[in-house]
Image (cartoon, helix red, strand yellow):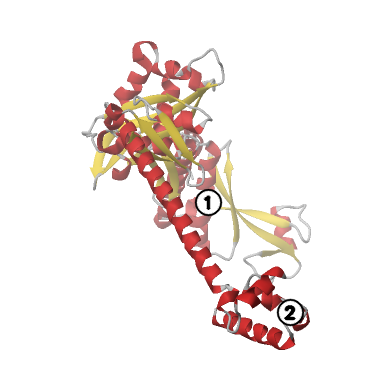
Amino acid sequence: MGLNLKNVIEQVGKDKGLDKSILIDALESAMVKAAEKKHGPNKLIEAHFNDELGEIELFQFKTVVEDVINPDKEISLAEANELDPEAVLGDSLGIKLDTSEFGRIAAQTAKQIIIQKVRDAERNVVYNEYINKRGEIITGIVHTFERGDIIVDMGRAEAILPKEEQVRRENYRQGDRVRALILDVRNIQKGPQIMLSRTHPNFITKLFEMEVPEIYEGIINIKGIAREPGDRTKIAVSSNDQAIDPVGACVGVKGSRVQAVVQELKGEKIDIVPWSDEPAKFICNALLPAQIVRVIIDETDHSMEVIVPDDQLSLAIGKRGQNVRLAAKLTGWKIDIRTETDAKKAALEQAEAETSGILTETKEGQHKTSEATQSDDIALLHGVGPKTQEALKNAGINTVADILSADIESLSAIEGIGPKKAQKLLEAAKKTGDRE
């Protein structure tokens, strides 16, 4: 190859931002491929870039043997010594090939492989650059639109802002500047696919990191975010330094910090609330600006009943239920909001219901006891008169069950009860027990 490739490699590497070794590998691979087309695939051909000459040299390697069986891979000792007097049996001898032999087809093959290698290398550079930026915010220019998706030009690469990751109320035109979160980077056949998002909660996190140094430095922590993109976001914050108010730091002087975020979000409302590890207190904070009277916690159902003044109900619930919905999402608790009037009414009804239930249970219990006493009365047994009843009661036998637990001997021993009557009493008691 008469062309000095050294300058070309350096220039292409500079223009494309590619490592010199990547281009050399691509050229060497292309030359081997072209040589295999020219000389056949069964030969052991290697390519090496000669930095001094600025060209790719090709070598066919053959093993030095006494008797040549495979001329493509073997060379006799005599022939080898002509090329290299020091060659001995078993050596692998590299024979330089004339690269000027390559015709138009070989050159075209080499060109195609180089182009493909350069393209692959460019893709890998882009992929490696952006995969490390995943979760970060980037800025690009709206390039084109494809079926609702926005193609964003980021300079060295293009990214996709899918329709589902766009904020509903936002509109863009070609040439507009757009800022978004790098959601994912995929290495597909066509090249790196960079997915963007403006709806993800982490977009809010990164915007606040950019505007609030205390968050970036880890002094203030974002404990949770609940967002309905384009409408409203609730963000819970805490401070590792008691001297720093987390809400005040995020709001900034005259609201400068939070307003910078709101401006980027095209007017989306942002509620910044203090985080608390006490669930009831956290719920109250999350429902701000509504005032809370009291909170009733149900640990089993992981829910809370929140009581608010009558005039605070609509504020606590929010437009279309948004405030309570975001508060529930932020805290992870189910929230049921009631006014004081409704809560008092419900408590009164429950108290009445509980009282009614106790009376019913008492009456039913008395009724059941009455039935049990009646069915167990020894006076109902066949052949038991007043004298026999009195005799049995004097002996401590008051119910049918007492008779069944006794035997003939103990019954016969009772004054006024003989063996025959004792037998009849047991039979009568058994019949009564069987009916029950």
State the separation of the CA atoms marked 1 and 2.
115 Å
Q: Which residue is mark 2?
A: 411
Residue sticking out furthest to the top: 253
Task: Specify the amino acid type for callout 1.
Answer: Ser
Tell me the quarter of the picture where residue 349 sits.
top left
The spot of residue 279 in percent (x, y) is 49, 33
Quadrant of the image containing the C terminus: bottom right
The image shows residue 12, relative to residue 45, as above or below, that is above
Relative to 323, 374 lies left or right: right
Q: Which mark is residue 29?
A: 1
The single residue placed furthest to the bottom in the displayed view is: 420
Is tag 1's residue or tag 2's residue first in the polypeptide sequence? 1
* Residue 418 position (above or below residue 79): below
On residue 338, which mark appears? none
Q: Nearer the viewer, mark 1 or mark 2?
A: 2
- Identify which amino acid the numbered label 2 is placed on: Leu
